Amino acid sequence: MAMDELPIGRRVAYWRLRRNLSQQVFADRLGKSKSWVDKVERGVRRLDKFSVLHDIAEVLQIDAQMLMGKEPSRRPDSVNCVDQVEVEEIRSSLECYDSISPFLNVISEPPLPVVELEKSVNHAWATFQHVRYGTLARLLPRLISDAQAADRAYRGSQEEHKAASLLAQVYMISSSALRKLGEHELCWLAADRAINVSQRAGDPLLTGLASMRVANALRSLGRHQPALELNVAVANQLAPADDLNPDRLSVFGILLLQGAMAAAHLGDNAGVKELLDQAEETAKVLGKDDNRYWTCFGPTNVQLHRAAAAVEMGEGKLATEIHKRIDMTKFDVMLTERRATHLVDQARGYTQYGDMDGATTALLEAHSIAPSEVLCRPLAHEVAQAIVRRSRGAAPQPIAELVEQMGTAA
């Protein structure tokens, strides 16, 4: 049964359970009895006062309209963005020092076998790269806790490096997702955790990727110069020389691309060109687009970053020209996150030189590919709002509808 078809008491129960509240705790926060809550959820007691509905919605941290079953009908069922409660659950897991410190004697359940944990981590990577941010947010708190417990339990064993690698990956996934969602301080915390743990995993490439997440977090916080310096320094450490291992090439290449993005924020045209050209040469050696070490690095991704860097420097027309030169047969088979992010960048580029029709088309195409990339990202919200503001007369109806969806999905 769809959510909007459920009785209101069942909807209250659904959101109470999603918030991990017992009936007693929920009742205490409302100033009601447990019996009152039970009767509401079973439909024995009616909820006919808006003031009571408002109090319930406030405790559950949702819009009162959602309790009346109106929210799901106003956005696609496939889209479920991250709310503040879920962000706080991720924060709690990241800040759980008793789980990550070997100096605290914590009694816990036996850790997951490394093989099982690896399956969960691979699933989380796929969930992120296929732009299912709401699903990922609900996976991460438990996954962080499981990975922390495994890392702690397997120290000194044959599984020590593998467990550390998996925990570092979980932190990197968390950092990347939180950055997308505009949670920049928390993004930095997860990235900092990743770089520390990755050094224990004994994998320089993993440490390189964790360093890149720290640099991306710095960019999100407006610290573009240290982000550039960190990406370039780590790339120099991992420069392939005569080592043409595809994994090393991919990590080296993605560091160059992220360095180029930091340089673009600084308006460093020469630095952007140098880093992108070096990345392009690396991609030619690699020969194809690949997702080694979850980088999605290759010739096509270099072109996507050329366009993105142009947008960051305010050269929207150049960005759209670069887009026209991309081999769309290769673009169409890239990971969902890469394609949708590029289209959002293209929409930004179009707005820079006043082509609102082009911006509308690009943003709607991004939405069709990956609704969460548009409905859940603050950056995409800014683009949609810019289109509405700058459209002569009434904004295109699809964009007006999209802006309304953004308000209900966030």
Image: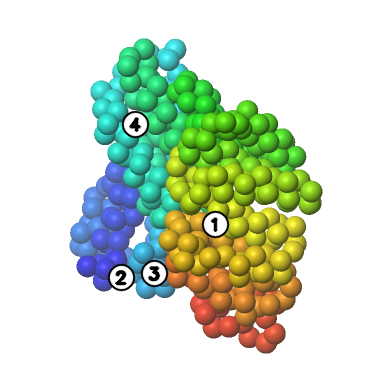
For the residue marked with disc 1, what is the amino acid? Thr
- 236 w.r.t. 41: above or below: above
Label placed on residue 76: 3
Question: Is the residue under label 1 in contact with that under label 4 (CB below 8 Å)?
Answer: no
Q: How far is mark 4 from mark 3, CA to CA? A: 32 Å
Q: Quadrant of residue 349?
A: bottom right
Disc 2 is placed on an element classified as: helix
Q: x, y (%) of residue 264? A: 73, 51
Report whether residue 223 is seen. no
Q: x, y (%) of residue 88? A: 47, 42
Disc 3 is placed on an element classified as: loop
Which of pointers 4 and 3 lies earlier in the amino acid sequence? 3
Q: Which residue appears at 39% of the width and 31% of the height?
A: 166
Disc 4 is placed on an element classified as: helix
Label placed on residue 300: 1
> In the picture provided, is 219 more to the left or to the right than 109?
right
Which of pointers 3 and 1 lies earlier in the amino acid sequence? 3
Q: x, y (%) of residue 10? A: 25, 61
